[in-house]
Image: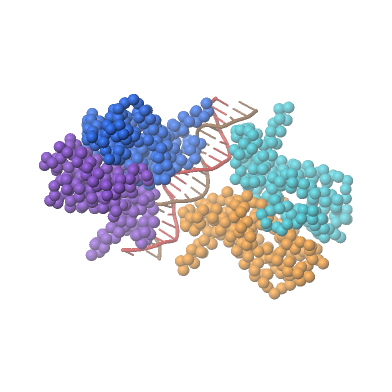
Chain colours: A orange, B cyan, C purple, D blue, E brown, F red
DNA sequence: AATGAATGAGGCTTCATTCAT
DNA sequence: CATGAATGAAGCCTCATTCAT
């Protein structure tokens, strides 16, 4: 019972911390502000996380776990690879609406070298499943897709998805693709990249 | 004469600052270390840049300028769009070898929602030319390429290029594509995405 | 009955607190650790002691009381002064084996200008009997001892005793005197200092 | 030149720090207050000392060095042991008047186990010369003194000296010996302890 | 023009103390 | 009575920035 409450409290703090870290970055984030936003005292955070770094890494870890959960659900479904891809893509756009902070933090480390705790973060990201990659590999094995680099293509599609999320981009950096056009466009691109 | 020296000095400082910012991020970067690495006194930096933020933004500005220069050179050449694309791609891989710091800083703002000075950096990036986008648009106009979203496709190819630069990625995050395979693979992908 | 239990509880806490204070000093001591070592909750300590300072002072007070009890026993015995001195000395070495924490705390205030709560501690130490001093004064009165400063000599002997307790000294600071040699050496010194 | 100034600055800070540490102990001392008392900014202290602990240990080290200098001077003089002892004793009382902070800090670690950085402090105190011990040993060798434990006797005399410094004692703890009586009394005691 | 010694705002972290259960 | 989760004051330390030389 107590342990469950502890866990819930940690999750609450992580939720708030994710917002702060996503908005201001690791160094810009302020433990005190996180506490205030979480409606608790500064010291309370230290009951649940040993240091700011710890809080950050546990936040990253929580994101990885959440992503993996979703990946597992989709990958294990009884669908053909293309339908699975579509589902993953839809799920990402759902995340954009529901968990933009998580998505920001994830993308900051998913793509490109980031200077905050590279080793530790890399270790955590080792556990992150890449459903697009897995599905494409599966499709190639089944003979439904064709590409010389399935994994790279998976990451590549991922970057296209992210590119079409205005909230993850610099303002005005990437031209608007109408919301309802995004998924068809991505699927069309997938087809081009993976057709036999 | 004096002004020329001033300009050279600024460029030298920016060169060093780019290394520091690329390696440690904005907050992690240390003005004193930049001074030491530049072989000058800490105070001297403040003769050329009002604040650390200023130095950072001017560094970003310098990168944008340098990139634009190269873009201008290539775009204005008398080549067909596909050959231009190839040249841009080759130039990026050349940058990877010669100016990794610039590339890191550029990619951090090009592809990541980076939390440092988003408005100011966005303003600077507004001036950044996107040669891939321009060339693809040109190719579409000339009827040599076909794609519903030329600009997005330009950014998309860009992200593929970056993805194949191990130095810009988390360690072990993206599978190795042999160096001599990279450009052919990218060009092949370009063809798939832009073929009529 | 309840009050008796209260008293016993206080004594238990003080016992543990003495260990912690002796080992880590006042500031280094940790209320939570004291609670854990005492097998009670942190809040419980505050049912018995208003503040950490209070706990410290009551610990000192307890030590003074315990020492006084022993002093009273010995001083009131029907022995000649020299035998009493010997008994006191033996008692101190017994304390070294059985109550090293008490001894450490006592000696820290008996011999060192210790910066924690000097006034309050001084007030408590006013009540501390100095059996060596008393006995020497008695001996001088009875004409068995001779010294111009009986009290100082008492303290002086005390410091010799403490000096021969390795556990109270900096590691390796004072050369070893074999355990069985200590009391004879002290008594010999006493004779030198007090002989007529 | 610059290095000399640096050294002088360090010494100035140590001078002030010694006062603060002597008065309030390590934990009670406040870096900011030390800075204010030294008439400098808080950050300046950190130009000369890496941490508060470092400042403390360097303060202890400075005390040890100063004491050693005096010891060397006296021990190497061409006097007989008894006259040297007298000189050492006089020097200590001179220190009492001129460097009470140093004396307080020294005595806090010279006598008895102290909880602040015991290992590091012990290492520094290993270098502290004990002139009384040295002189007594010399006297024993020359056949002028007689005692089974020359070193212990040296420490013992030392504790008598300290005991007669009211400023190092709890208020009212040790009875007053008139200032002009102190040295004769100590010398008399020395004679008793060391006579053949 | 160039320097680097000095500064102090700001942020992380600890821990004695409180109080709702 | 007893608890321990929660608090926030307090203090160490960093580092961008200043300014006297």
Q: Pick whichever, D161 or C93, lies toward us.
A: C93
Q: Is residue B58 visible?
A: no
Q: Pick whichever, A96 or B95, lies toward us.
A: B95
Based on the displayed image, in which of its 4 quarters is residue A56 positioned?
bottom right
Q: Quadrant of the C terminus of chain B?
A: bottom right
Q: Quadrant of the N terminus of chain B?
A: top right
Q: Residue at x 74, y 66 (%)?
A: A136
Residue C64, image x and y in percent?
25, 50
Residue B91 vs residue B124: left or right? right
Vertical position of residue A42 compared to residue B50: above or below: below
Q: Residue at x 73, y 52 (%)?
A: B165
Q: Residue at x 33, y 49 (%)?
A: C167
Q: Pick whichever, D69 or B49, lies toward us.
A: D69
Q: Is residue A9 visible?
A: yes
Q: Pick whichever, D90 or A37, lies toward us.
A: D90
Residue B135 vs residue F9: left or right? right
Q: Residue at x 49, y 28 (%)?
A: D5
Residue D39, image x and y in percent?
44, 32
């Amino acid at each position: 019972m107590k342990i469950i409450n502890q866990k819930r409290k940690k999750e609450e703090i992580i939720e708030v911390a994710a917002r702060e870290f996503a908005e201001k970055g690791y160094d810009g984030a302020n433990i005190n502000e996180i506490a205030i936003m979480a409606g608790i005292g500064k010291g309370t955070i230290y009951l649940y996380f040993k240091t700011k770094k710890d809080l950050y890494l546990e936040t990253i870890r929580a994101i990885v776990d959440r992503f993996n959960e979703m990946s597992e659900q989709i990958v294990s479904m009884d669908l053909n690879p293309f339908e699975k891809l579509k589902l993953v893509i839809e799920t990402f756009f759902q995340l954009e609406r529901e968990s933009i902070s998580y998505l920001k933090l994830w993308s900051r480390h998913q793509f490109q070298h980031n200077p905050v705790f590279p080793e530790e973060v890399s270790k955590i990201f080792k556990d992150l499943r890449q459903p697009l990659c897995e599905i494409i590999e599966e499709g190639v094995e089944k003979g439904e897709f064709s590409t010389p680099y399935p994994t790279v293509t998976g990451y590549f599609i991922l970057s296209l998805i992210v590119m079409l999320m205005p909230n993850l981009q610099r303002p005005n950096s990437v031209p608007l693709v109408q919301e309802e056009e995004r998924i068809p466009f991505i699927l069309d691109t997938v087809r081009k990249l993976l057709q036999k």
